Amino acid sequence: MAASASPPLVKDLRRRLGEENVLSAPSELVVYECDGYTIEKNRPDAVVFPRSTEHVADVVRLCNRHKVPIVPRGAGTSLAGGCLPIGGGVVVMLTRMNRILEVDLRNRLAVVEAGVPNIQLGRALAGTGYHFAPDPSSQGASTIGGNVATNAGGPHTLKYGVTVNHVLGLEAVLGDGSILRLDPVANPAALDLLGVLVGSEGTLAVLTKIWVRLTPNPHDYRTLRAVFNTLDDATNAISDIIGAGIIPAAMELMDQGIVAAVEEAYHFGFPLDAEAIAVIELDGPTAGLDQQRQAVGEFCEKWHAREVLRADTPAQRDLLWKCRKMAVGAVGRLSPSYCIQDGVVPRTRLPHILRRIAEIGRKYGIRIVNVAHAGDGNVHPILLFDERDKEVVARVLAAGEELLEECIRCGGSVTAEHGIGVEKRAFMSRLFGEADLAAMAQVREAFNPGERLNPGKLLPDQNRVRRG
Amino acid sequence: MDKRIDNLPLADTLAPGDQDGVAAAVRGAWQEGKPLYPIGGGTQLAYGARPAEPGVGLSLARLNRVIDYPARDLTITVEAGVTIAELAGRLAAERQRLPVDVPFPAQATVGGAVALNAAGPRQFRWGTLRDYVIGLRAVDGSGTAFSAGGRVVKNAAGYGLCRLLTGSLGTLGVIVQVTLMVKPMPQTSAFVACDVPDGDTAEKLLAGLIQTRTLPSAVELLAGPGFDLEGNPVGRVSNPSGSLDADAGRVGNPSHAMRLAVGLEGSAAEVDWMIAQLQEEWRQAGVTSTITLPGDQADPLWNRLTEFSCAGVGRVSNPSGSPDADAGRVGNPSHATRQGLPVPSSADGDSPLVVQIHVAPSVLVALMERLRELDPRASIQAHAGSGVVFARFPVEAPEAAAMVDQRLRPVVRSAGGSMVVLGLPQGAALGRESLFGPAPEGWAVMQSIQRQFDPKGILNRGRFLFAPPA
């Protein structure tokens, strides 16, 4: 076996966790040198698979003793490099902490270990009449711990909220190895530490156990798919829907570029000259749904939709959704590499940002296609390229940067659901002022003094200034 | 002359006209190391411990601009001093609302509501105010202004400082501006209510609601003389044939009767359907008669259920001494009467002991029964679906400490819950631990955060959890 960077630490870890739960051979570590963000890579010194919160606490204490950074990781689906072991250290894999500990319908909650895949909880809840609302596109692989750490979203957030709205309690290990247990019963005589831990990307604590809120399943659905001549027509129709007080469960927008990609790959027969296709889904008690569908259909027609399809059966519903669900896969068939960006603007600025993205694509000679969670102004530009060509990669990065700058200019943000990670650290000082970042640095100092957990993420380096 | 307003010892009160003025006021206090007490609409000044040290009252009343309301983006940005009623009026013009109940909306401000993380009966479906604060601007204890969040409804950039400051009672920063996510205004609402003879039946119906096909906005369980089930139980009774238990809830009555009221909101078609559906579900569960308050008839009950915990709480020793004419007007029981709302029965007096308890919903009914055993005169309202209980006890000032420390806290502890004291009988004073309970989990981290945001501890010194600097 090749020499490890830090043999005494590895020995300590093995003694505590057992041989089988510690990896240190370079050939084994290579898998963990990056996550879904593949532009930067670095090999960790060791990878551990704790089985309990106490294991995690011991790992944190051992790493502190050996002055080695700790990088928590779930399924590694981060698109922002949240799990990149900058400067090496120990990657703490939560994936073997994957038990669903309790489903408590009376209190509408479930208790899970952090490594439970989102979809596994969904399966366990089948037949109960309840579900865990956050459903990021990664849900087939991503863990609930990862969803919580990144405050994950998905297509249903306008109506159902993001992950933080569905977390009731947490157990976590802090930077000093102490265990924090935030009970699911609220306490007004406290600061909301839970609200800070959700979305903290592993920089404040290693999450080990989560009490999640369960949401009643909708009893019925109405799904529509409309083809629009222009982007403005599509977004005006969506604006009218919201103006009429209708909040659909999902409003997914696909632009001309992604429709073309889907056609190239799968030949659905979509018109290639239409600028936008919207998939709109209503849910809730059956009463009132037809009325809402009628109104949504009328708004689409008012804005010159050339085709509005309505699903009446589950099979038809699946068919209307198919083009959206296969969109990213279509891109994968067309391009050797692609990068999914994550920007957000005030919803009414969607036409503007999509037009600017098209201009940016032309400027840099990069094909960019878009899917958007249109209800909340969250756009996912997908940049198609070949990562073997360094010059192209440079243009992709420049185009990505320019489109995120434009999101900031529109009053939006550089990430709606993927997180900052390493990818977007540089944007933090453009999005926030010095005092704003100082406040965040103060919070990090309280949970994770000395930046022992997931260093080099979320906040820009220069921000260690303290006020007062 | 004593200028104490409710429990705040004010040497002076400033009312800056803009956000820079607030920062300047905080810097002034910071330089002197003197406490500073932020004041919004003055509706909750009785909440918290009584600070000993005189300081400067900082009124946010003049920060009352609506900064931006892009209605179709479902967001609004307002300054902290905008009242809840003004906010609601702006939103209503676009058929939108903030689905969070705030007591005394004509006086209460957005900043104050955020500082307390307001939430009422609608929290069952709609959550607490914390779920709607997507951006804010505040001035920390050194007078430095900072922002958190943004103006978009979905934002994963940086830590959730909006949530941290919400509910921190101004101890991390004086909130000067807030961006809220808003929702469409439902077309109508209704209550469907029934009387339940005992706790077991109440629990059975609450457990049954887990599989209801309706989507309740509120699930309320009411008991005791504050809800005079004989007279005017839940606003007006629309269905005279609905039989009421005439004996239920009379003062001193040993009856265990309670009333379960479910609030429904949506389009007319949805609400009509849900009313019929819930009546049918309850009929199958053995409920023989229900009371329905449709449309406008439901409004007084929504208000009542929002203000029950605060009515009659708080005193003003010298309202005229306040430069902010509104401070302290509310909390006065006559205010509730002016609005035409039933004042909680005189049985619990003008300044009862009022506590707020959080427990798991599954043990809520048992807890309510324990509270009624402790004092049969208690009036109790529960947001039963969310595990929140408000109890009002007509105890005298000398009994208050023993009631809280020796009787209530052990009951709450054994139920695995938390408790804060919202109001005390006139003349009673309790320390921080009695009012707020034992140190919360994560206390060391909370203290560290508070010291970082307010190193000299000037913000609401001695009023919330944090000990004044030695």
Image (tube, coloured by chain):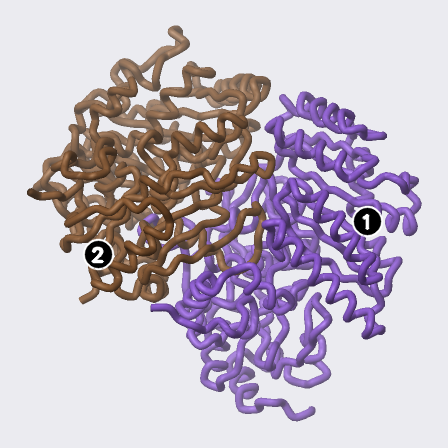
Observer-nearest residue: B85 or B322? B322
**x and y, in percent, of residue A460 in the image:** 54, 70
Residue labelled with disc 1: A326
As measured in the structure, the alpha-carbon distance from the residue carrying label 1 to the one carrying label 2 is 60 Å
Observer-nearest residue: A319 or A8? A319
Observer-nearest residue: B242 or A389? A389
Quadrant (top left, top right, bottom left, bottom right) of the N terminus of chain A: bottom right
Colour chosen for chain B: brown
**x and y, in percent, of residue A319 in the image:** 82, 38
Q: Amino acid at mark 1?
A: Met
Q: Amino acid at mark 2?
A: Pro
Name the mark on residue B35: 2
**x and y, in percent, of residue A189 in the image:** 31, 51
Name the mark on residue A147: none
Q: How many marks?
A: 2
Which quadrant of the view contains residue B290? top left
* Chain under numbered label 2: B
Left-right relation of A117 to B115: right
